[in-house]
Amino acid sequence: MTNKESVTGILNYALKGSPLKEDTFSADFIQIINGRPVTLEEFHRGTAVLRQDHPIIELTILSMAASGECVHSHHLVATVNQSNEKKRFEVFARYDFVDGKAVGCFESLRELNVAESIDVFFPLR
């Protein structure tokens, strides 16, 4: 399995609950979301809550590029929660791998059409 395939698997696991290869993550995996660190245990717990609270989730991968042990992903996530509230998010992520296992993910996430969410890259002043 390539690192790009692993990233697609991670995204489908996180958003849809698809099965994940057991050795996908390094034991010391860390994710940084908009500057906030998330451990592997918190990642698993958080994705379970996400799937429960937002049962209808659509993932659109806009682009993905690999270079060495690094994979960059630009994707959109659309959710509809149990109250039928719709939200869309844009995500830029860099996944780092060592020996075929994900060791880190650095992610910038913003909710689309929400003024306060715009913009992690160029904050409004």
Image (cartoon, grey):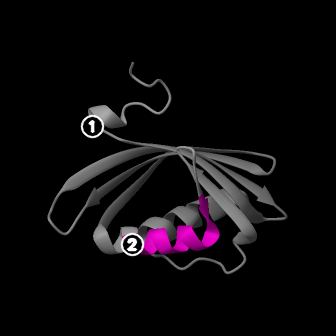
Left/right of residue 18 with respect to residue 10 in the rendered view: left
Magenta region: which residues?
38-49
Q: Which residue lies furthest to the top in this view?
A: 125
Tell me if I can see residue 91 in this picture. yes
Left/right of residue 63 with respect to residue 119 in the rendered view: right
How far, Cα to Cα, is label 2 from label 1?
Answer: 22 Å
* Quarter containing the C terminus: top left
Check residue 18 for magenta coloring. no
Q: Residue 71 carries which label?
A: none
Q: Residue 89: x, y in percent?
A: 37, 46
Left/right of residue 36 with respect to residue 99 in the rendered view: left
**Mark 1 residue crowding within 10 angstroms, few (<14) / some (14–19) / many (20+):** few
Check residue 43 for magenta coloring. yes
Q: Residue at x 79, y 65 (%)?
A: 100
Identified by mark 1, the residue type is Val
Q: Which residue does the numbered mark 1 point to in the structure image?
A: 114
Q: Residue at x 62, y 56 (%)?
A: 31
Q: Residue 49 carries which label?
A: 2
Relative to the observer, which residue lies in front, 105 or 59?
A: 105
